[in-house]
C-alpha cells in the first residue's frame, strides 16, 4: 500500500488547536504531524511534509516556516477569509492556497439572525433579570423591538449575506442591500431585496444593519464615525464579518452617546478584547466569541473540506476552494 503523504498542523486540542475528534478525517488522507513533533525532528520530517493544514489561522505561516518545508505543495486553510495569509509570499514559493468558502454559510447566517433577535428582544438582559436574586417582580412595561416587518440593511450580499436575506424574508422584513456588484434580478426577487448603490441610503433607512463582508484593504474600517452617524438613533448594528471592518472607537462613542440604539458583535479586534475594553462594559451591546460557524456538523464539514482540498491538490484533481494568487 502506498504511504500516505504527511500533513502538518498546529497542535491538538485546547482552545485553538485541532479537535481530536476530527483527527480521523485527516488520517484518511494524510499522516498527521503536529508542530511540536515537527520542531523536535525537522531533519526527519522537513522533506516529507507536502501539505500544511491551517485550522483557524494556526499555525502562522511566515518565511521561516516556508523555508523549513522544501516540498510543501499546498496550504489548505479553514474558513472563507484568507486575510491571515501572506498570499504574495506563499505563492512566490509555488505553493497552492485553498480555503473553505460557503461551507459555514448557513450556520453563520443563523448566528447573524440570533444576534439580531437577541438584541431586539432583550434576551440577555431578560435572562439576567429573570435569574437575578434581586428580582422581586417583572417589569411588564419593559419592551424591545420587532424583527417582523422591520427594515434590515445587509452590507455585503455574498453567499452568507444572501442566506441571511432568505431567513429575513420569513420575518417579512424589508431587505435592503449594498454590495460591490448588484445581484441578478432573479436573486433579488427571490428574497424581495432592494439594491442600494450608495451605502448611505441603506444606513439611513435600516432598523438593523448587518455587515457581512470580507476583510481587505477596501473594507478595513468600512464602518466609521460618518457611517454610524448616518444610521437611525433607533437602529442596531450587527457585525459577523471581521472586527477590523469597524472603527471600534467610533462604535464605542456611538453606543455611549446613543447615536445608535445597540450593537451585536460576533467579531472584534483583537479577539478576545482586552478585559478593560469599553465595548465590554457598554450596556447596549452583545459580544460573542467569534462563533458564527461553531456547530459540530459545520466544523466537521470544514475539516473535511480542508483535508479534501489538500488531498485533491496533491493528486492533481480539480479543487473548488482555490484561492487566486494576488
Image (cartoon, grey):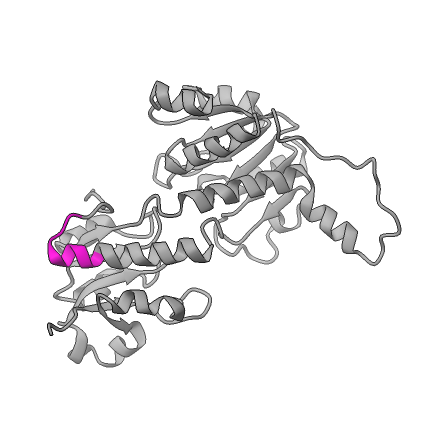
Count the labels in the image: 0
Q: Is residue 120 left or right of residue 109?
A: right
On the image, which quarter does residue 95 sit in?
Answer: bottom left
From the top left corner, tell me how far across and down residue 165 is, in percent: 47, 31
On the image, which quarter does residue 178 sit in?
Answer: top left
Closest to the observer, 229 or 20: 20
Whether residue 25 can be seen here:
yes
Q: Is residue 117 left or right of residue 176?
A: right
Whether residue 242 can be seen here:
no
Which residue is at the far right? Answer: 136
Closest to the observer, 14 or 187: 187
Q: What are the residue bounds of the magenta stretch?
A: 310-318
On the image, which quarter does residue 217 sit in?
Answer: top left
From the top left corner, tell me how far across and down residue 218 is, in percent: 35, 34
From the top left corner, tell me how far across and down residue 250 is, in percent: 55, 37
- Residue drawn at point x = 62 percent, y = 51 percent: 280
From the top left corner, tell me how far across and down residue 138 is, in percent: 84, 45
Q: Is residue 312 magenta?
A: yes
Give the quadrant of the C terminus. Answer: top left
Closest to the observer, 139 or 35: 139
User: In this picture, is 144 found above or below 104?
Assistant: above
User: In this picture, is 159 found above or below 48?
Assistant: above
Q: Main secondary structure of the magenta part?
A: helix
Give the quadrant of the N terminus. Answer: bottom left
Closest to the observer, 264 or 103: 103
Q: Is residue 55 magenta?
A: no
Amino acid at each position: 500500500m502506498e504511504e500516505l503523504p504527511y500533513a502538518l498542523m498546529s497542535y491538538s486540542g485546547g482552545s485553538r488547536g485541532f479537535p481530536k475528534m476530527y483527527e480521523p478525517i485527516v488520517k484518511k488522507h494524510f499522516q498527521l504531524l503536529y508542530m511540536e513533533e515537527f520542531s523536535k525532528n525537522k531533519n526527519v520530517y522537513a522533506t516529507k511534509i507536502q501539505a500544511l493544514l491551517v485550522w483557524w489561522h494556526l499555525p502562522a505561516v511566515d518565511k521561516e516556516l516556508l523555508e523549513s518545508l522544501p516540498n510543501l505543495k499546498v496550504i489548505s486553510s479553514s474558513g472563507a477569509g484568507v486575510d491571515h495569509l501572506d498570499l504574495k509570499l506563499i505563492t512566490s514559493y509555488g505553493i497552492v492556497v485553498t480555503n473553505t468558502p460557503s461551507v459555514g454559510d448557513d450556520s453563520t447566517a443563523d448566528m447573524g439572525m440570533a444576534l439580531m433577535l437577541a438584541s431586539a428582544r432583550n434576551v440577555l438582559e431578560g435572562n439576567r433579570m429573570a435569574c437575578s436574586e434581586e428580582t422581586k417582580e417583572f417589569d411588564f412595561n419593559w419592551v424591545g423591538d420587532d424583527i417582523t416587518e422591520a427594515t434590515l440593511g445587509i452590507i455585503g450580499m455574498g453567499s452568507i449575506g444572501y442566506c441571511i436575506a432568505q431567513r429575513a424574508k420569513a420575518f417579512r422584513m424589508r431587505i435592503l442591500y449594498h454590495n460591490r456588484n448588484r445581484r441578478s434580478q432573479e436573486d433579488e426577487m427571490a428574497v424581495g431585496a432592494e439594491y442600494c448603490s450608495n451605502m448611505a441610503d441603506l444606513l439611513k433607512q435600516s432598523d438593523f444593519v448587518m455587515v457581512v463582508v470580507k476583510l481587505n484593504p477596501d473594507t478595513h474600517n468600512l464602518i466609521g464615525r460618518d457611517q454610524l452617524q448616518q444610521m437611525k438613533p433607533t437602529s442596531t448594528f450587527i457585525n459577523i464579518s471581521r472586527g477590523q471592518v469597524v472603527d471600534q472607537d467610533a462604535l464605542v462613542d456611538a453606543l455611549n452617546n446613543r447615536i445608535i440604539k445597540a450593537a451585536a458583535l460576533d467579531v472584534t479586534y483583537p479577539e478576545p478584547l482586552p478585559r478593560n475594553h469599553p465595548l465590554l462594559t457598554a450596556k447596549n451591546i452583545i459580544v460573542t466569541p467569534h462563533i458564527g460557524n461553531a456547530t459540530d456538523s459545520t466544523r466537521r464539514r470544514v475539516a473535511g473540506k480542508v483535508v479534501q482540498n489538500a488531498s485533491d491538490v496533491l493528486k492533481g484533481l480539480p479543487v473548488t476552494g482555490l484561492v487566486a494568487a494576488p
